[in-house]
Image (spheres, helix red, strand yellow):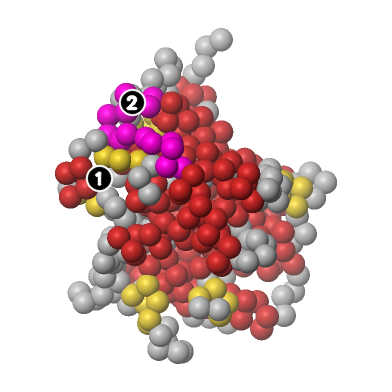
């Protein structure tokens, strides 16, 4: 059977490919060029995750890891405040609105850097990192910065995003020389790409309205069978229809591969040899679209079909607990680009190790994939534990590796 380059490329645009290649990377074991792996230390990492989860969720009723958790800051749910104040005309319109917010907010969610913070105008409190980015995006959304209708602030219009100036993001995220945010230009360009993509596909994003990111809800709802849709289908559609927004990186057969990188050690014997798909932001977005679909009465199944997220909190957890160790310790002091093999290897190992850690956590807690899917372990969980141990080990709470971010990966 002859596989075309286009078909080979599309075989990498799904969660199964991410999981398969991550585990192939882990299976390389002692031949990995950048990291050694000590699986004996996974039990200690799992204990930290369990302790962290129990502290935050004593009943073990853990919500999904998603952008919606970042709108809940110090016990106050900023999205919930908007939701409760709205007289939604229909569950579908609430879902479209939530899709609008989630898509824009997730795309703005690459690492902020340690020096940035957001001052909430109402309370005057300062919020940093992921929660700060979430709150800044929510305030812009609420204040009609993404809508073309002054009387209709809670929406995002493709036409507005397509022409979004960098200065609007600079102002909305309160960026100054004293309050620097990593790669504002990259983030703004990502939103412009999103706007152009949405405008170019009215059959996907404009089924029930003028083209808007939230139109993806109607596209997914139409795919639901018997009121159900698989989480892996959400990701496949996100990768297919939002793929053009990512900056030009690797392509195969004319298909943009998105968050997919090269690692010489990963050999497959076909045109995809050396390619490592990770799709972190696309999966983070897919996780974040589950709840809006549920709010509209659509059941999302096979949530565990998605993988763990290849980002620096989860990856940092494994380095900081000794599961992963740099073969060259001096590499921790150097800066690395996101396409460096060391970073690609770290991220792929993170995905595979999250699967293994999840098995230990479930066994210890006497739970299964249905009661404790990976989305809950991430929330409970690995992401929070990764952040906590980073704060213990480093004054700035940053990751154990120095990554040069372009604002569109981490």
Q: Nearer the viewer, residue 210 or 292?
A: 292
Question: Callout 1: helix, strand or loop?
Answer: strand
Residue 149 forms part of the magenta stretch: no
Residue where numbered disc 1 is placed: 337
Disc ID at residue 4: none
Picture layout, residue 223 above or below residue 388: above
> In the displayed structure, does residue 209 sit left or right of residue 159?
right
Where residue 38 appears, x then y in whole percent? 38, 36
Where residue 330 appears, x then y in whole percent? 16, 44
Question: Callout 2: helix, strand or loop?
Answer: helix
Q: Nearer the viewer, residue 400 or 43?
A: 43
User: Quadrant location of residue 72?
Assistant: bottom right
The answer to whether residue 400 of the structure is visible from this angle is: yes
User: Within 10 angstroms of label 2, few (less than 14), some, or many (20 or more) residues?
Assistant: few
Picture layout, residue 55 above or below residue 205: below
Residue 38 forms part of the magenta stretch: yes
Picture layout, residue 121 above or below residue 270: below
Q: Nearer the viewer, residue 236 or 63?
A: 63
User: Quadrant location of residue 244?
Assistant: top left
The part of the chain drawn in magenta is 28-42
Q: CA distance from mark 2 to mark 1?
A: 24 Å
**Which of the two discs, 2 and 1, labels the residue nearer the N terminus?**
2
């Amino acid at each position: 059977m002859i596989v075309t380059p286009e078909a080979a490329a599309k075989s990498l645009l799904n969660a199964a490919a991410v999981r398969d290649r991550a585990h192939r990377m882990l299976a390389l074991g002692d031949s990995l060029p950048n990291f050694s792996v000590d699986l004996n230390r996974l039990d200690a990492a799992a204990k930290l995750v369990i302790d962290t989860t129990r502290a935050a969720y004593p009943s073990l009723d853990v919500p999904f890891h998603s952008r919606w958790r970042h709108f809940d800051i110090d016990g106050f749910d900023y999205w919930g405040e908007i939701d409760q104040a709205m007289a939604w005309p229909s569950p579908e319109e609430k879902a479209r609105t939530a899709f609008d917010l989630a898509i824009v907010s997730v795309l703005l969610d690459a690492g902020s850097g340690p020096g940035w913070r957001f001052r909430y105008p109402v309370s005057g409190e300062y919020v940093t990192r992921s929660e700060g980015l979430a709150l800044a995006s929510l305030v812009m959304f609420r204040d009609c910065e993404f809508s073309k209708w002054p009387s209709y602030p809670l929406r995002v219009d493709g036409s507005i995003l397509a022409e979004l100036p960098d200065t609007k993001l600079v102002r909305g995220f309160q960026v100054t020389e004293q309050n620097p945010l990593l790669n504002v230009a990259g983030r703004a360009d990502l939103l412009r790409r999103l706007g152009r993509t949405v405008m170019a596909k009215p059959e996907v994003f404009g089924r029930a309205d003028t083209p808007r990111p939230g139109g993806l809800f109607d596209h997914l709802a139409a795919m639901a069978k018997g009121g159900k849709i698989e989480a892996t289908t959400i990701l496949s559609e996100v990768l297919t229809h939002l793929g053009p927004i990512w900056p030009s990186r690797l392509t195969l057969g004319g298909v943009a591969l998105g968050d997919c990188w090269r690692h010489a050690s990963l050999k497959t014997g076909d045109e995809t040899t050396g390619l490592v798909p990770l799709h972190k932001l696309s999966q983070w977005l897919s996780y974040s679209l589950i709840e809006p679909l549920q709010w509209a009465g659509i059941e999302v199944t096979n949530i565990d079909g998605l993988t763990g997220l290849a980002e620096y909190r989860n990856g940092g957890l494994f380095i900081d607990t000794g599961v992963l160790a740099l073969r060259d310790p001096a590499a921790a002091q150097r800066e690395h680009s996101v396409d460096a093999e060391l970073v690609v290897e770290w991220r792929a190992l993170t995905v595979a190790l999250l699967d293994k850690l999840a098995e230990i956590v479930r066994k210890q807690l006497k739970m299964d994939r249905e009661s404790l899917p990976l989305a809950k372990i991430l929330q409970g969980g690995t992401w929070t534990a990764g952040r906590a141990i980073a704060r213990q080990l480093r004054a700035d709470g940053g990751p154990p590796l120095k990554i040069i971010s372009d604002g569109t990966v981490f």
